[in-house]
Amino acid sequence: MTSDPQTEQPTADTPPRRIAIVGAGPSGLFAAQSLVTQTRLPVEVDVFDRLPTPYGLLRYGVAPDHESIRSVAGALAAVFASDRIRFCGLAELGAQVSREELLGAYDAVIYATGANEDLRLGIPGEELLGSTSAREFVAWYGGHPDARAYDLVGVRTAAAIGMGNVAVDVARLLVKNPTDLEWTDMPGSVLEALHASTVRDVYIIGRRGPQHGAFTVKELRELCTLPGVQVSVSEEAFEGIDETSLDRRCRANVETLRAAAARSVPEPRARLHFEFWRRPVEVLGDTRVSGLLLERTRWEDGRVVGTGRFETIPLQLVLRAIGSRSDPLPGVSFDLKRGIVPNVEGRVTTVKGRLMPREYVTGWVKRGPIGVIGSNKSDAAQTVGHLLDDLVATGPQPATVDLWARMAERGFQPSTLADWHRIDAAEAALGADQGRTRMKIAEWDELLRLAQYEPPTP
Ligand code: NAP
């Protein structure tokens, strides 16, 4: 007897269904929240993550000076208050746990691993020292333990390629007065590097016009009104724009750029140059970046084409901010062309559309890297709704794998919520020493020490 036939509600003796979620970022945690707040079926949820810290992109991708977005972490932390959710850190799919093991141990698996592979420009010189993805730069200033350090001494001019919010984030962090970042949770080493930075000119390169930017208005306004930063916009950028034909966001973006270009900032500490209708054709340099070769572009038959007019910007740092895609997950169905796990409203399918029972997906790995953090909430609700429909229809799945015994045999134990709380407390204490709410710990050694991690016995 698993449910009351009158009400279809679970009865007290209904055994809980076991759900694994892979990825403890916003999309995974919204899915966990949706699972434990519903009343159709009792559930127990294990949230796996390869890091000992939850919150994914919220912790490592949202800019440190965007406190209001980060406050979502407070709401997500409440998810762990449920005793039906367990955090299983340091457990990576394909390394410490496999898809087969998860399917053998749980009634259903939800993949929520985000979009971690950067798109590439595919132009010569992209591999030179000083040319990286903006995502790596964000990981560095966000204190991700895998990030490598950036040295901004000797970098006078930098460029962000792309007209999205990631380009805005990296440009802002490069031109903003570092004193205005001292309150944030950035690691001390990052703040030191930003104080020592010699960057004075930052270019944002767009292959289309100001009316085509993917920026959100709030983010663009913030960038264009930074104290001490002179904004310029490439000549001819505003020509031929019919503002009446634009939607509200694009019109506001154009107005923001016009106003910023018209504003004169006396003795600026940094300059921000928007270069529209230009596409990068080569990153110049021998081993290190020394310049960026651009071709002017125009719109023809609904696409961007080159004009054959070239120009060079001497610079020392190029950050690609042209979007990202998901990495294939070991053993899991994947659409290489679209860079997502193929799915129908969160139910995983093969590329040809055959349903893969008991496998689900949510967040950027489901729909691609679009939308703000909050978009993942409704997305997770859709996936969880279908998962519950399927579980109700199919009944409990007998476990064929004792995952915890298997992991113990390998000498491995996932890190726990208590381990994260130790890291959390240590970061808060480091911050308090400096009058900040938190200072991130970015070193693997220290994170593992605080998580009391013991390496698997050989
Ligand atoms: P995005 O919004 O998709 O913007 C990518 C930009 O790269 C577009 O301007 C695109 O131009 C350009 N681009 C693509 N391929 C290019 C190429 N080969 N050459 C030159 N330019 C190229 O991506 P994103 O900035 O990575 O942001 C991802 C998502 O995260 C977005 O939904 C964003 O809003 C969100 N996000 C939000 C915040 C925030 O709320 N503060 C912060 C960061 C990220 P075309 O339009 O011409 O293709």
Image (spheres, grey):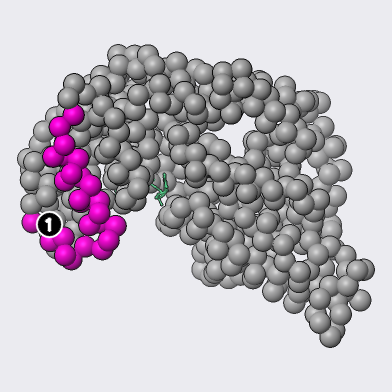
Look at the image and tell me whether residue 207 can be seen.
no
Percent from the top left, x then y, of residue 214?
Answer: 31, 51
Percent from the top left, x then y, of residue 175?
Answer: 31, 27
| Quarter where residue 236 is shown | top left
Q: How many marks?
A: 1
Tell me which segment is drawn in magenta.
240-265
SS at badge 1: loop
3 up-or-down from 196: above or below:
below
| Quarter where residue 204 is shown | top left
31 up-or-down from 414: above or below:
below
Would residue 243 be found to the left or right of residue 161 on screen? left
Would residue 70 be found to the left or right of residue 76 on screen? left
* Quadrant housing the N terminus: bottom right
Pick the residue in front: 98 or 262. Answer: 262
Look at the image and tell me whether residue 18 can be seen.
yes
Residue sitting at 73 percent across and 29 percent down?
422
Q: Main structural element of the magenta stretch: helix, strand or loop? A: helix
Residue sitting at 13 percent across and 39 percent down?
262
Residue annotated with mark 1: 241
Residue 223 forms part of the magenta stretch: no
* Quadrant housing the C terminus: top right
Percent from the top left, x then y, of residue 220?
Answer: 30, 44
- Neighbor class of circle 1 (other Cα within 10 Å; few <14, some 14-19, many 20+) is some
Residue 255 forms part of the magenta stretch: yes
Pick the residue in front: 128 or 7. Answer: 7
Percent from the top left, x then y, of residue 324?
Answer: 42, 46
Task: Give the residue type that dot 1 points to.
Answer: Ile
Residue sitting at 26 percent across and 39 percent down?
224
Pick the residue in front: 338 or 239. Answer: 239
